[in-house]
Image (cartoon, rainbow, N blue to C red):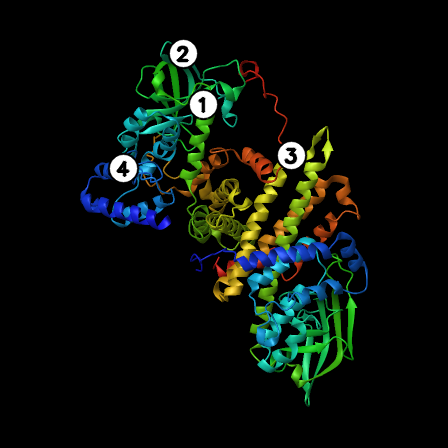
Amino acid sequence: MTTATPTASFTVTEEQRLLRATVRELIAARATSERVREVMLGDEGYDRDAWAELAQTGLTGLTVPERFGGAGATFAELAIVIEEAGRRLLPVPLLSSAVLGTEAVLAAGTEQQCAALLPAVAEGRTTLALAHLDERGGLTSEPGVAARRDGEDWVLQGTAGYVVDGASAEMVVTAAVSDEGLVLLVVPGESAGLERRPLDVLDLTRPMATLVYDGVRVDDDAWLAGDDAMVALHRALSAGVVAVACEQVGGAGHVLEMTTGYARDRIQFGRAIGSFQAVKHRLAELLVQVESARSVAEHAARVLAAGDRHELAIAAPMAKSYCSEVFEQASADGIQLHGGIGFTWEHDAHLYFKRAKATKLLLGSPSHHRALLAEVLSL
Amino acid sequence: MAIDERTLVTERIEALLASHPPASTPERDFWGAQFDHGLAWVQHPEDFGGCGVSPRWQAEVDRRIVEAGGSVRNRYLNVLGIGMGAGTLMAHADEERQRRMLRPMFTCEEIWCQLFSEPGAGSDLAALSTTAVKEGDTWIVNGQKVWTTLAHLATWGLLVARTDPDVPKHAGLTYFVVDMQADGVDVRPLYQITGEAEFNEVYFDDVRIDDDMRVGEVGQGWAVAMTTLMNERVAIGSNVAPRGSGAIAHALEAWKQHGGDDPVARDQLVRYWVEAEAQRLTTIRAGEARKSGTPGPEGSTGKLHWADLNKSITAFTIDLLGAEGMTYPGGYEFTRPDETANRAESAHKAFLRARANSIEGGTSEIMKNILGERVLGLPGEPRVDKNVPWREVPRS
């Protein structure tokens, strides 16, 4: 049974402190409520200006090794950027491109493939998405796309559902079943035969698409021919799971701040509503949960950064299951404690509520991750 | 500076271990020598059991003593004296009291108890109603204290009493050291829901205390009591238990023996495992932040989180036991457990004992007020007893 106590460290380096301050400032200026709403109701898919600015600051290729044009930082640094973006719901493809796509290419691509693909990704010129589910998005089913060799080419047929930023990505890392087992193929978003249908999503700040592959043809170089595709996909998804947890902590933390501020300012019965214990205690409970969520998410990010696969099998599902539920509770309480204004479209509370629910179900629900954890713990 | 302190502390440890090898020195003699070497509470001055260095060196001292086969269990045997009384006496008592009382406190020749809570003053401690009335150079004490750990073994008690009922509650209190063997002190066991009596009730019936046993000025009792309670927080410390230990260990064991394959129970078990780990990791994170000088809100949530979680997990463990959960193995024993015994609690006893976690040391409701007001900056409730003489405030 795997209950040996791991070493857990939360030391924050001076560079990390500086990174957080820089990113927070940058994002606060970019992700105003007005701008987030403009992007989420527009057709661009994500905030291209913000993404360009993140790219200039070197934040779009943070974990890409320097030899592939990235910053060569660890996931601990990327986690800070993701958390800060999550605080303000900044609509950019950090999860899809900087985490899922990049990790898949890094894990499965050959040196040459990484060198060919990743510099443009790190510079923010190309965005990636990961298409690995079937049409219904079931976690345990095989990918919905099949690939077969045809001479020097691969031909893809089938449907991949719930692809984050699938409609806007320049390149779609597509997991497909083939005679050789699972393969990962990098498919240009504009390929002939690829239809990208935007989903009507609950969380408008994070677009998803259904990708229908009808005889999409790519050459053999699109096949990520490095390490085992199954292992690579697992690595990318583990990173994605931890990234979502960090993002959730950012969102939950912001909801707590926003709601606490409101409870201080809003007067009813001649008192700030935050002076009533019914309100105060709920916020205190949220504080406990948010701080605990921060601990598990940071732990997971550091474990991922350290490459401790064994502990990651515990830390990642732990973080995703816990942070999902904390964010859901925080965002729901956020609406309730704001009262009527919290139910309006005008107020941002619903954006966090929707982000919370959607991320709870993204890359596996809490109960799914607890089931994984039960296996690891032999329960 | 730090290097000097390290040298000083190290030399003293070496000298202590050389002159009093723990293996061949009776416990009390060793503790006495430890006191005389200034290693009892290193932050206090020379001659008073300390050597005037940063309190963080104490952990190093204790570690070395334990490594050498010595014992630091006096800190548990006399937890209220060493943990809280010493700091209070050093801050507020006169030198004569300090010289007389600190050494036998440390050697456990004299056990201490803390006489704060009352039936009518739990969360609202400052509302307490035990009175001390001055007659010449003597105070006459009447009233009742409750939840008094170790009172039945204690030589001395740390007492807060009301000396002026005509001023607002915080202003009318005075702090004393009371002789627990004095006439009129009656200590009775307080049996709790486990059947045991970990605590006592203490009755005062015209108990006489000399004025020189007063600690701090008349009317300053609240400030002195706060010193005691701050020492309590330090005494509790921040030891981090290993992953999967404590209440969750009972739950895991119960699952293995009785769990079977109920998917709902399994999900709940993992949920609690995660929550316990989240709490544990937060304790580690808080410790690191404190050490690096950047403490944040994570340092204030531990007590509330742990208390409520421990209650939930211990209750869930009984559920996992199924029919066996209806039993109380060994039956209820109406005993006074020895505080020092390292009790391996059964899941059943842990379940009952845990009810107190969210009451003792600050109820969860009060903890939420503290988090809400001090950490989140929310305004307090309006206080109906503010600026009102204690005598005029309603009491149950």
Residue density around tag 3, few if under 14, some if 14–19, many if 20 or more, within 10 Å? few
Q: Do marks 2 and 4 share a subunit?
A: yes
- Quickly name the residue at label 3: A278
What is the distance, in whole Å, between disc 3 and disc 2 at their CAs?
44 Å
**In the foreground, A372 or B223:** B223
Query: Mark 1: which amino acid?
Result: Gly
Instruction: Give the position of the N terminus of chain A as an image quadrant.
Output: bottom left
Tell me if I can see residue A60 in this picture.
yes
Give the chain of mark 1. B
Tell me if I can see residue A365 in this picture.
no
Query: Mark 3: which amino acid?
Result: Ala
- Quickly name the residue at label 1: B221
A70 is higher (above) or lower (below) than B235: below
A58 is higher (above) or lower (below) than B240: below
User: Does dot 2 land on a helix, a strand or a loop?
Assistant: strand
User: Does dot 3 land on a helix, a strand or a loop?
Assistant: helix
Query: Mark 4: which amino acid?
Result: Phe
Name the residue located 23 percent from the left edge and 44 percent from the top edge: B16
Q: Position of residue B375 (x, y in %)?
A: 58, 40
What is the distance, in whole Å, between disc 3 and disc 1 at their CAs?
32 Å
What is the distance, in whole Å, between disc 1 and disc 4 at their CAs?
28 Å
Give the chain of mark 2. B
**In the foreground, A172 or B335:** A172
- Quickly name the residue at label 4: B35
**In the foreground, A217 or A250:** A250
What is the distance, in whole Å, between disc 2 and disc 4 at their CAs?
36 Å
A92 is higher (above) or lower (below) than B269: below
- Quickly name the residue at label 2: B134
